[in-house]
Image (tube, rainbow, N blue to C red):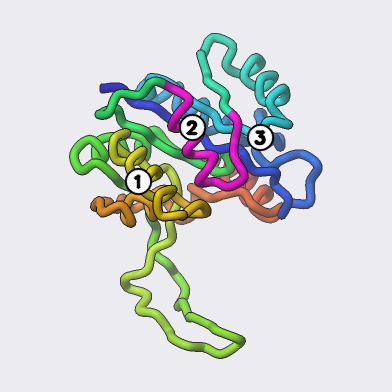
Amino acid sequence: MKHHAIIVAGGLGQRMGSAVPKQFLQLDNKPVIAWPVETCITSQLIDSIIIVNHPDHKQQLEEIISQYFPTTNIIITNGGQTRQESCFNGLHAYDFASDDIVLIHDAARPFITVDMIKQCIDVAKQYGACGIYVPVKETVAQIHDSIVAAVLPRQTLYAAQTPQCFRYSIIIDAHKKAQTNNLYNATDDVSLVINAGYTVKAIIGDFYQNIKITTNEDMELAKLIIKIS
């Protein structure tokens, strides 16, 4: 049984209004994408790393790998039109064994920790599937056509983060069943696994540190996290 990390970096970062995708922006002393890659390497828990990248930025990614990780064999594969398609491509970029553990992480979340990786791998080994979640702090409402339809019980609501981690046989089955059912635009892999009939265990994450960089404000927050860490 081996442990693999699929880092999804296929986005173009259009919400940041930058010509450079967010995963390639400089964060302190290295690009955003280099942060989670470095943690996967230094954890010594990951046997192989696959980066799913937009084909237009392959050379840029290769230059980053050459500069920051010259001795690490990192597989690069093309992303798809959606996040779901990108993950599916990543799941075919290596000759996985059915009982291998696959950890899927967003390149735009730079502050994944070794402890998160270890927890995810351990839980996925035992239960087959898991994800990182944080409790929702605000009251959440459902709104339709500007009308508040319902206020949801906050005690049971959690926000999904990554990494999410699976036994390979489970995650590939979930993706194939989604395609059979004409589902092509899932925003995360856990939803596919649940739809396929599997149980997913929740791991409580870090609300303040494991942020996803989506906007310029998120980038400033990330710089502040580095400064106070």
Q: Quadrant of residue 158?
A: bottom left
> Is residue 101 rendered magenta in the image?
no
User: How many angstroms separate mark 3 from mark 2 (CA)?
Assistant: 12 Å
Q: Secondary structure at mark 1?
A: helix
Give x and y (percent) for residue 200.
27, 51
Give x and y (percent) for residue 155.
32, 73
User: Disc number at residue 90?
Assistant: 2
State yes or no: discs 1 and 2 in contact (Cβ < 8 Å).
no
Q: Earlier in the sequence, mark 1 or mark 3?
A: 3
Q: Which residue is mark 3?
A: 54
Residue drawn 51% across the image and 26% down it: 38
Q: Nearer the viewer, residue 133 or 1?
A: 1
- Amino acid type, residue under disc 1 in the picture: Ala
Residue drawn 53% across the image and 42% down it: 85
Give x and y (percent) for residue 98.
27, 28
Q: Which circle, 1 or 3, is nearer the viewer?
A: 1
User: How many angstroms separate mark 1 from mark 2 (CA)?
Assistant: 14 Å
User: How many angstroms separate mark 1 from mark 3 (CA)?
Assistant: 23 Å
Magenta stretch: give its range: 78-94
Q: Secondary structure at mark 2?
A: helix
| Circle 3 Cα neighbour tier, 10 Å, few/some/many (<14 / 14–19 / ≥20) | many
